[in-house]
Image (cartoon, coloured by chain):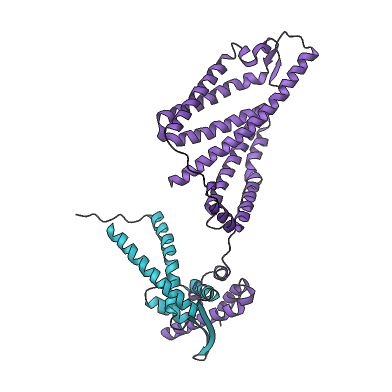
Amino acid sequence: MPTAPDAPNAAETALFENLRLELRRGGLVLAVLGQLRAEHYGYTLRKALAERGLPVDEGTLYPLLRRLETQGLLTSEWREEDKREKRFYRLSPAGDRVVRLLDAEWRGLNASIARILEDE
Amino acid sequence: MTPLIDRYLQNVRASLPAARRDDIVRELAEDIRTQIADREEELGRTLTEDEQEAVLKHFGHPLALATRYGPQRHVIGPALFPVYWMTLKIALGGALAVNVAIAIAWLVTGSPVGRAAGHLASFPFTIGVTVFGWITLIFALLDLNLPRLLEHAWADLKVVALPRPEGKGRRWTLLAEIVGGTIFLIWWLSIPRSPVLLFGPAAAFLAPAPIFDKLYVPITVIWLASLVVLWAVLLRPDWARVRTIGRFITDTLSLVLALILLRTEAVVQLAPGVEATDKLIGVVRFINAQARIVVLIWILATIWQILQSAYRIVTASSTDR
């Protein structure tokens, strides 16, 4: 009968947490860019990502949006909605081109890793 | 906006880049307001202060949140950091070994215990900080020029040294070291019975100074210890780490001896019963002055060897990991 793998100890859990964050970092950029093919403001963007299984805290998301905007991948504007001013973000034409490339890269990488892990 | 949220946003604002702070705070305030309104609608009542605090905690510490908006800054980037870290460990380890040797030399030559202990206790705040500061500064400057340096290195591949081959060559070097070390030991152990081995024909009028008797046994012990280490590595090649650590310790002890000699007035004197003519006194003075230069060179060479051993220890421990 196969034996269940040992539960990770505290050091392994901490290591896993670090690696998980590293793994998530690049994926998060792609997810945000992908989600912003439709216009969102911060709050609805966070909700949309969480509904698709990628919760992200505000302290990470808002600075990331600013960085992506500075890099020219997003555009933004303040606009009124429900009688309140909100800052709406959307993918820029450059962002649209980059997200296509990243999407292809992501799928290729995903397929390769899946094959590698299946081989084991 | 409640006073709690106002206070939080003011704290974030204070650390934000000046040009964008109004815009960023406006956006954060809007998100906080929406989150609280949504939650209040869900509960059908206004949020308590604790519940509002829970919302803010999600955004993180005000300073941590604000710094994420700044450009990503570093003194030494990830490309250079491993080399920086290794150099720092080597330099600090080497400097510590040298200063331990200095403190022991002081103790042996009769300096108060307090002076030696004080010297070692102040190491982290004096020499340690200085070594840390200089190395960090040098690497920070290197980091600024890293792209240009890498381009240059890439254009001239000769700068990339090949790893030293393992195997027979190193074994022969080890054997040579053992043979040389054993010959020295036989010579050294014969000196008390035949001073002519130390001074040659000059043994007729020269004799070792009292420091020789004091250091004779320690030198013998250190030399024997290093031979034992060499034999151990010859018989057990997988004990390379023992050799590196053993070498580091024997080099540090050897530095202690050299420093004691540096603090000594004379290493040779006139042999008992020899008349102290001006000429002979001049010869003794000349030899002692020359010996001082030799000791200084010995000290520098030993410090260099200590740094090399520290390098091997540090690189071995990083490849072990």
Q: Position of residue B163 (x, y in %)?
A: 47, 42
Which color was chain A given?
cyan
Q: Is residue A40 above or below residue B301?
A: below
Asked if one can make out residue B231 in the rendered structure from this viewpoint, the answer is yes
List the single residue furthest toward the right: B278
Direction from residue A118 to residue B167 in the image, left or right? right
Which residue is at 48% across, 25% downward?
Answer: B178
Which residue is at 77% across, 18% downward?
Answer: B282
Foreground of the two, A42 or B122: A42
Foreground of the two, A86 or B107: A86
Which color was chain B given?
purple
List the single residue furthest toward the bottom: A83
Which residue is at 28% across, 61% downward?
Answer: A118
Q: Position of residue B241 (x, y in %)?
A: 46, 37
Q: Is residue B62 above or below residue B208?
A: below
Direction from residue A99 to residue A66 in the image, left or right? right
Q: Is residue A17 above or below residue B13?
A: above
